[in-house]
Amino acid sequence: MIRRNRFRVSCDARNGEQNLKDDSKNVDSHGKVDRRNMLFGLGGLYGAANLTSNPLAMAEPIKPPELDKCGTATNLNTNEKLDINCCPPVTPKIIDYKLPPVRFIRTRPSAHRVTPEYIFKYNMAIDRMKRLPATDPRNFMQQANIHCAYCNGAYDQPGQGTLDLQIHNCWLFFPFHRWYLYFYERILGKLIGDPTFSLPFWNWDNPKGMTIPPMFVDPKSALYDEKRNQENLPPAVIDLGLTGSKDPLQVVSNNLTVMYSEMIRGNQTAEDFMGSPYREGTSPNPGPGASERGSHTSVHAWVGDPRQPSGEDLGNFYSAGRDPLFYCHHANVDRMWTLWQYFLPSNKVPDKKITDPDFLNASFVFYDENAQLVRVSVRDSLDNLRMGYDFERIDLPWLDYRPPAQAARTKVMKASSSDAPKAESVFPVVVDRIIRVIVPKTKKGKADELLVLENIELDTTKLLKVDVFVNDEDDNQFELNKASYVGTYAQLPHKTKNKTAKTTISLKLTEVYEDIDVEDDDTIVVTLVPRHQGGGITIGGIKIIEAPASSSSSKSS
């Protein structure tokens, strides 16, 4: 299907604003790209991105790390210094990267649908990357160490003393990883002399892709990594909810519910999906977005090897990049950002673009395919087509996977009146068991409201996950495919000072209320279900607030 007169989002931004241009061709002589011919199997569904800007932001954007001041990274599970050097080679020459003109679009394929010829080429590229000299910044371990250094405390924020630079759990999560994969992909293409080469994406959001792709489990392949959970090799179905259910059909249904919740149902603002603002001087971990704390984190944890001391490889930030599957996983994470930006309904979150200058002007450094150190900005990463790549068309079964409406209310009402205590008598509380409390609404019946879990204190050395339900009827811990499921909070281990972090998340309740029949209720019952073992997470308070009117997603904080 070709869409006529479609507007394209141009990332040629000035003063924190973005322009809309009407391009008539897919790729023109200047490398500009129209999305008209880029199909994602949505039957013509398209969400316009309304753009706004905020001239009041007073802080400064995050600056690239100073490579010559790179320190020793930390094993986040033990808080001990790593016995490896995650720091990249240092060079005095850094150039500002300019996106090359787009002459053709590289199409990233679904990892479960690739041809034998593609697998041969991909394996050869990774093999050649592993054979590069250890000091070459394009070498496989050097590329893996990018994630280690940026994510495990090797870098401090320039000019901010010993304040860690951390690109997770904030609004830089998607742009950083997009640039990371962009150069990784170009390096692989350079090594095999094929500028059209593109990374595959592991489409764990589709039932046909909910197992580890076969090409990654061949022990003779350069794509193989022995440090994976042996119980989760194919034909095991990935558990995006980390529920522990052994019923494959239930797991698939849970997975689709998780995807619908984090992509469609649970977001009120762009920051709810992208992550909280992170500016110069901001402490690490201001708050992850729905996708990062949901499916993204679950895939890492599910693949990581429990036989290893710290869940290596994929289950720990410092070692994640050592598994070739990491890049395939993050290609799908990047695909989620693209889908959310341009192809999902806009009625849920009308303002999908963050136009705060502190977001757009944040920058990183990477080595490109020519081993040249380059500086890149967030503003140049906002349009994947302008970066010269797209994704194979794959159906989205979660797009309309809204849980069935809840029929009965008797048990919930009985519990709310007798079993569950009021929230104020319970919080703050360590979430090391199932917790069920009554929370007052802002008004009776259906309303546009947010559930806020505030002052969440975290032990950042641990894998943590807590699922949230409202007026849950049966407390079946293995089922997420029901109207009462609201969302989740999850984290992988990562380094912070004193091994702690504090954050707050909000979950949209509007559609949940429609499905659980709140009638004239002025309270709801909230259930918190931990998926981790032991403590490590304390929630300071829980409340319901009125959802703010849709407005700019570029507020200062």
Image (cartoon, rainbow, N blue to C red):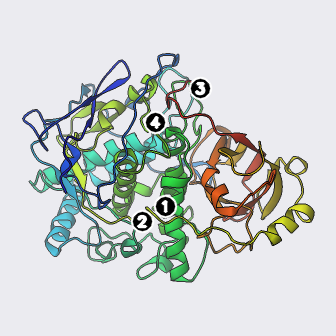
221 and 382: which one is in front?
Answer: 382
User: Which secondary structure lies at badge 3?
Assistant: loop
Q: Which residue is mark 1?
A: 259
Quarter of the figure that contains the N terminus: bottom left
- The crowding category of the residue bearing disc 2, from other C-alpha atoms within 10 Å (few below 14, some 14 to 19, many at least 20), is many
2 or 1: tag closer to the N-terminus: 2
Amino acid type shown at disc 2: Asp
Q: Position of residue 552 (x, y in %)?
A: 50, 29
- What label sits on residue 557 in the rendered view? 3
Position of 326 compared to 81: left or right? left
| Rendered view: 107 above or below 544 | below
User: Which secondary structure lies at badge 4?
Assistant: loop
Image point (36%, 41%), residue name: 48
1 or 3: tag closer to the N-terminus: 1
- What label sits on residue 481 in the rendered view? none
Amino acid type shown at disc 1: Met
Q: Which residue is mark 2?
A: 205
Q: Position of residue 358 (x, y in %)?
A: 45, 24
Q: Is residue 315 visible?
A: no
Extreme residue in the front direction: 520
Position of 361 compared to 436: left or right? left
Disc 4 to disc 1, how far (Cα)? 20 Å
Q: Which of the 4 quarters of the picture holds residue 131? A: bottom left
Amino acid type shown at disc 3: Ser
Amino acid type shown at disc 4: Asp
